[in-house]
Image: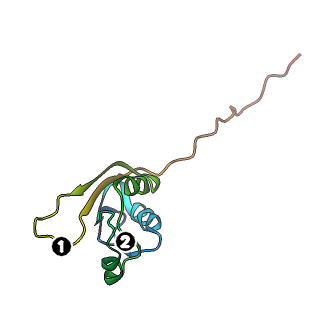
Amino acid sequence: MRSSSGPAVFALLLLALTHVAEPPLVLAEMRRILKPGGRAVVVDLLRHDNETLRREMGQLRLGFAVEELTAMLTESGFAAVTCRPLAPEPQAKGPALLLAAADATPPVQPAATPRKPRGKEKERS
């Protein structure tokens, strides 16, 4: 996923993670396309037990727990992660939704190795 205009400042995943085999890989790609300080938002299903709905919708999983999605975002390089269930509408028939938001952190730079000063060393007597 490359953009000719450079890294993105915002990325949204809407009801997508329950359909993929490896959600952490999708979140890592989301992080990769964001510029440092960019914002990520994920909306997906809160963990539920409706196996029939999962099959009918072609989903690979029964949603996510708040702690699970928070950990996946953090492990994918996001910071300031917030995650909470959304209050369902009174007439809603499906499972509740989950809203997560996070900031893309700058890539980790390797620590600088101290260098010895250049020049002639003093001869020891």
Q: Quadrant of residue 64?
A: bottom left
The kind of secondary structure element at disc 1 is loop
Pointer 1 or 2: first along the chain: 2
Instruction: Give the residue at x 34% y 77%.
Output: 54
Residue 93's disc number = 1
Kind of element beneath mark 2: helix
Q: Nearer the viewer, residue 115 or 22?
A: 22
- Could you tell me which quadrant the N terminus lies in? bottom left
Q: Residue at x 79, y 22 (%)?
A: 122
Q: Is residue 72 above or below residue 21?
A: above
Residue 88 x, y percent position in the rendering: 16, 63
Eye-nearest disc, 1 or 2: 1
Looking at the picture, does residue 125 appear above or below residue 57?
Answer: above
For the residue carrying disc 1, how many other residues have a C-alpha within 10 Å: few (<14), some (14-19), or many (20+)? few
Residue sitting nearer the eye, 36 or 16 = 16
Q: Nearer the viewer, residue 22 or 37?
A: 22
